Amino acid sequence: FVSFKQMVMSLRVSELQVLLGYAGRNKHGRKHELLTKALHLLKAGCSPAVQMKIKELYRRRFPQKIMTPADLSIASVHSSSMPATLSPSTIPQLSYDGHPATSPLLPVSLLGPKHELELPHLTSALHPVHPDIKLQKLPFYDLLDELIKPTSLASDNSQRFRETCFAFALTPQQVQQISSSMDISGTKCDFTVQVQLRFCLSETSCPQEDHFPPNLCVKVNGKPCSLPGYLPPTKNGVEPKRPSRPINITSLVRLSTTVPNTIVVSWTAEIGRNYSMAVYLVKQLSSTVLLQRLRAKGIRNPDHSRALIKEKLTADPDSEIATTSLRVSLLCPLGKMRLTIPCRALTCSHLQCFDATLYIQMNEKKPTWVCPVCDKKAPYEHLIIDG
C-alpha cells in the first residue's frame, strides 16, 4: 500500500507542476516549495479527480507498481484531518449530500482560483444531486458512457434567475473514442461519438423526454452553446418556445484528460417545477443502421394480420352497420409511393402500413415518431415489419 502522501513525495518537479496546474494552484517555485503546496493540497481534502491525477503521475513514474482501486479509496485522504488554520477559501470543495465521492461532478478547486467564489454549491436539501431519473432512450444514439448522471438544477439563491455549474473530466479512452470518430465524408467535419447534454423535468415516475427549463442559457468552458431555434408561436401573445432536444456540445469540449470541462447553466425558476440535466457520451447512428436493426427483429407473422382482418369484418351485434369490405392502399401515406418495407407500430390497430425506410429517414431529420395513419405515438422500439 502506497499512500497519496508517499506518491506526492516521490514526484519530480515537472510532475508536481502538472499536478498543481491541474488543481488550479500556483505551480511556480523550487522543488521544496512545490512539494509543500502539493502536500497542503492533500491536507485540504483534495477531490477524486486530483487523486486520480496523483495516481496517474505516480504510475508514469513507477510503471511496475500496479495499484488496485482499493488503494485509492477516498478514506486515505479525509478532510477531517484539515488543520484549523486553513481559511474556507483555501478548501474549495463541494459536499455531495451523502453521495459517494466518485461522482463525476468535480470540485470547484479544479476550475482555478478565479472561479472559486463565483460558482454556487451544487447541493440543496430539497433537490438530490442524483435523483433517480431516467431519460428516454434516443433511437439515433447508442449510449457509451454517463459523464454526469441526471442531476437536479439547484441553485443556492432564491431569485427568479438561477445559475449553477457542473464539471466533468474525460478519460484517455473517451478522448480516443471521440477524436477517432471524426467523420469528414460530408461537407462539414463532424464527430459520430459525441458529448451530449440533455435536460428534463425532475420526475421519477417514468423515463423522461427532453424538456428545457424556461430561458435556458448554457456555456461550455466559457463559450456560449447554441440551442435549437424558437418555434413560431401557435397563438398571439404566447411566448415562443424552443423545441427540447439533446444538445451536441462536442465542439466546445476540451479533448483532454488533464483539464476538466465546465458547464454553466442559467435558467428561470418555475414554481412547482424542477429540472434535471445529464451529460452522456453517445454514438450517433444513421437511418440505415436503424433499418438494419428493425429487419433483425424479424417479420410479424402473417396470421396476425389475418386475425386482425377477421376481427374487423366480424359483425358487431351492438352495431347496425356491418363492415363487408376493408380497403388498404399499397402506397405509403408518407411518400405516396409503393411500399417496399411495410411496417406499423405494435400499438396501432389499423391494417394500413407505412414504409419503414421513409418513416425512419423522416424521423432522422425531425424526430416526432408519430404514426402517419392514426397520428398516435409510434416510437422506434414499437415498430415491426408486417408479414
Image (cartoon, rainbow, N blue to C red):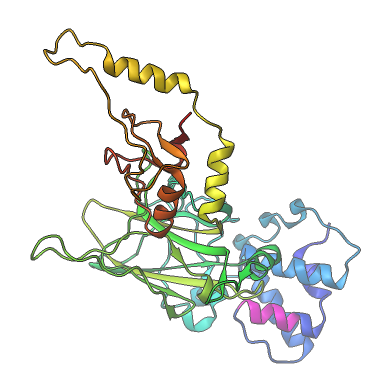
Horizontal side, residue 252 vs residue 41: left or right: left
Magenta segment: does it hold 21? yes
Question: Looking at this rendering, what residue extends furthest in the bottom direction?
Answer: 29
Residue 270 percent across, percent down from the top left: 23, 58
* Number of marks present in the image shown: 0
Q: Nearer the viewer, residue 198 or 66?
A: 198
Question: Looking at this rendering, what residue extends furthest in the top direction?
Answer: 317
Q: Measuring 70% from the left and 54% from the top, which residue is drawn there?
A: 73
Residue 225 percent across, percent down from the top left: 41, 74
Q: Quadrant of residue 170?
A: bottom right
Residue 96 percent across, percent down from the top left: 50, 56
Query: Do we see residue 208 in this rendering?
Result: yes
Residue 221 percent across, percent down from the top left: 49, 77
Q: Quadrant of residue 281?
A: bottom right
**Which residues are the magenta region?**
16-23
Q: Measuring 17% from the left and 7% from the top, which residue is drawn there?
A: 317
Q: Nearer the viewer, residue 68 or 300?
A: 300
